[in-house]
Amino acid sequence: MKKSNLEKHLVACPHCGKQVLDHFTQCPHCKGELTPSGYTGKHDIKAQQKIRTVLFVILLAVALFVLFVLPNITNP
């Protein structure tokens, strides 16, 4: 039987035994402290690098357009 995406991230709280998500730092049921284990943040760094690269390319394209194409359109 295949687990759903949510079920993959459920763990038992060591204090009360109820199911909580693996990235929680505090149990919503008993307020006990939890050690997050599911989310590491590595994907965010890669995503941020991709976003920066794409934004840099777009900014460069706009700058080149403004410097080289726009003056030729306004002053034929």
Image: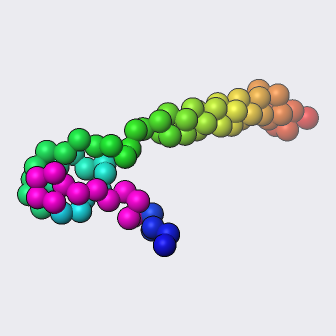
Mark yes or no: residue 55 visible: no
Above or below — where is 35 with respect to 68? below
Give the answer, above or below, for where 33 lies relative to 70: below
Residue reaching furthest to the bottom: 1
Where in the figure is residue 22, as x and y percent of width and height?
31, 51
| Residue lying at the far front of the rendered structure | 1
Which residue shows up at 74% across the image and 34% down it?
Answer: 61
Q: Position of residue 66 (x, y in %)?
A: 74, 32
- The answer to whether 31 appears left or right of 43 in the picture is left
Tell me which residue sits at (45%, 67%) in the image.
Answer: 3
The span picked out in magenta is: 6-17
Residue 65 or residue 74, whichever sits in front:
65
- Return the x and y of residue 48 as percentages of the image width and height: 52, 36
Image height of 64 relative to 14, above or below: above
Residue in the image at 71% along x and 29% along y? 60
Residue 49 belongs to magenta span:
no
Nearer to us in this view, 38 or 57:
38
In the rendering, at what x and y percent does residue 46 appear? 55, 35
Which colour scheme appears in the figure?
A: rainbow
Give the camera-side residue of 71 and 16. 16
Is residue 30 left or right of 24 when viewed as pictured?
left
